[in-house]
Image (cartoon, helix red, strand yellow):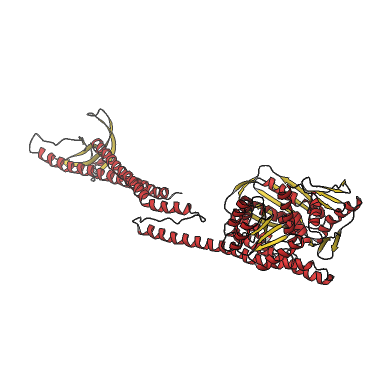
Amino acid sequence: MKLLTKTRWYLLVVSIGALITGGLVFYYTMNRIIDEEINEKLYAEKEQLLLQLQKIKRSNSILLNVGDHIGIDTLPSLKRVKTKSFIRDTILYDESEQEVLPFHQLVFYTNLEGKYYRITISRSHIESDDLFDATVMGILSILAGLLLCLYLLNSWVNRNIWMPFYRILDIIKSFDMEKGNIPNLPDTGIDEFNDLGREVKEMMKKIKKDYFSLKEFTENASHEIQTPLAVIKSKLELLMQNEIFNKEQMELIHSSYEAVNKLSRLNQSLILLTRISNRQFIGTDTIDLKELLEKKMENFRELAVHKNLNITTKLQENTILNINPSLAEILISNLLSNAIKHNIENGEINITLTRNKLEILNTGDTLYSYPPEKLFERFRKKDGNESLGLGLAIVKQICDNYSIHIDYFHENNKHKIVLTF
Amino acid sequence: MKILIIEDEKTLLCSIKVYLQEEGYVCETAEDFASAIDKTSMHRYDCVLVDITLPGGNGLKIMEDIKELQPETGIIIISAKNAVDDKIMGLNLGADDYLSKPFNLSELNARVKSIIRRKRFGGNKEIIFNELRIMPDTMQVYLNEIILKLTKKEYNLLLYFITNKNKVITKESIAEHLWGDDAEMFDSFDFIYTHVKNLRKKMTDSGGVDYIKSIYGVGYKFQGS
């Protein structure tokens, strides 16, 4: 979720919550207040009326402050007299509005010159209702309006405040190790972002330095080690031309020669591994895996025939991988050579390629006394085997670089390596 | 045939010189940029071997100079780097071939001969050895004037043997010559033996002599009288 969206979301949820809660609280509070208002009015009128009624005794005319309906009933007997007055809600026909409306009624009993009367004062809600509605709507609109403004203001402020952050983010994303000039991050006016910018810049400097340092190391290692090896190899080759050596002596010379070859290959493989993990293989291409597999299998065909291996394939067309072409070649080459090298005479190899999976199954005696997950570490090899033990480590490194998942399974005396992309 | 070897590592320079001299080439050497420039401006060579990792980083400059001064000269880059991109770059810059250290001297010899053949004789020069006649441009081999039906690998093997005749050739160098980068997979003795055996059989079946001598534990030698 985007940063701005998240802050907006929180604000929105809280605002709506506040609006609803506030609105409800306001509504019920107002309702009660108005209710009590009306009741108070009714009681006030009762007192006024009682006062006026006492005066009736002394004069013939009364001045009643009439605003509400007043009903006076004579009570025939004492039976229905209640001492307490009470308020109730009812519906009556209002002549002025010409419709049936809700009324608040105060009913009380009084004694006038020995006679008992029940008096009812009724007051309609309508005025207060209208007032009530208007007030509530008004307040709620103001509240909503306020929250909307707050929301918009918040969005605008946030967008502006976070701009330096996005700028720094862009710089990080577009950082190119090989060419990368580390750009200057201008003063943002916000301490935290300035700090962030500074730290990011330092980090980029260091990463770049480490990268080139390692790159230089691999180049030097290559040169410095390969040259003396070339010297040894050439001297041994010249030595072997000598006719005077017997069988044993020739074997001694040849063993040294073989060791030099192995050292050279080892050096090259380690350097390759380092370069791959240092991400020095930039540039990708759309590689058709089916084509690549077929090409590499053709390279190894003679060897497969020599070992009498039965190779079956099931390759799906158009299985593309976006990968550096050299690395693709190394990957497939190493996987295939591994399957062939560790295979037994008359063994078999089974290759299945689907849109997102490559499976290589091959026979061979139980290779490793190491657990499967250690298979891809460096220098893992069958005890006593001539191989370097780096082939699969290189494969794993390439897979890691491109987020390809690799697994090893040992089932039915067969070895299975599965790549998932 | 004149060859210039530009290499700063003295002992290696010496080895190359010895081997190529035995093959009959006149070899001159240069150990640094200055003497290399000197030599290339004064003499003409059939082939120049340049160590591109010459100190001072001038290996490429020498190559450019040679291409300017003597465009028909074959150029082989020798490099300790062995990076695929370096190889492509080298060839793009006009080198005729690229060999990475450490290499077999027999392989270097084969490359030199191949380039000179191409440059000097337009690839037309045929190779005659006793009853064998090899036509490199058509990749045909005649034994007593009858065509030998060889596979591509067998042809390359025969050519490699004859190019390095009377020299001990290790099985590893044969594997590298025939299979290049994958050589490591193919250098088992019995595998190479099978190919050699097939070649021998084809030669002797057509009435030829088996010149290939096994050097036990090491490789072979194509023995010419």
Residue extending furthest toward the top: A98
Does any portion of residue A377 appear in the rendered image? no
**On the rendered structure, is A287 left or right of A175?**
right
Residue A1: image x %, image y %? 46, 49
| x 21%, y 38%: residue | A121
| x 43%, y 61%: residue | A199
Looking at the picture, tell me which residue is in the foreground, A219 or B204: B204
Image quadrant assignment for residue A237: bottom right
Looking at the picture, tell me which residue is in the foreground, B151 or B3: B3
Q: Relative to residue A409, is residue A115 depicted above or below?
A: above
- Count the numbered circles shown: 0
Does any portion of residue A145 appear in the rendered image? yes
Image quadrant assignment for residue A136: top left
Residue A151: image x %, image y %? 34, 46
Q: Relative to residue A234, is residue A68 depicted above or below?
A: above
Residue A71: image x %, image y %? 21, 35
Looking at the picture, tell me which residue is in the foreground, A168 or B62: B62
Q: Relative to residue A69, is residue B181 depicted above or below?
A: below
Looking at the picture, tell me which residue is in the foreground, A34 or B150: B150
Image quadrant assignment for residue B110: bottom right
Residue extending furthest toward the front: B42
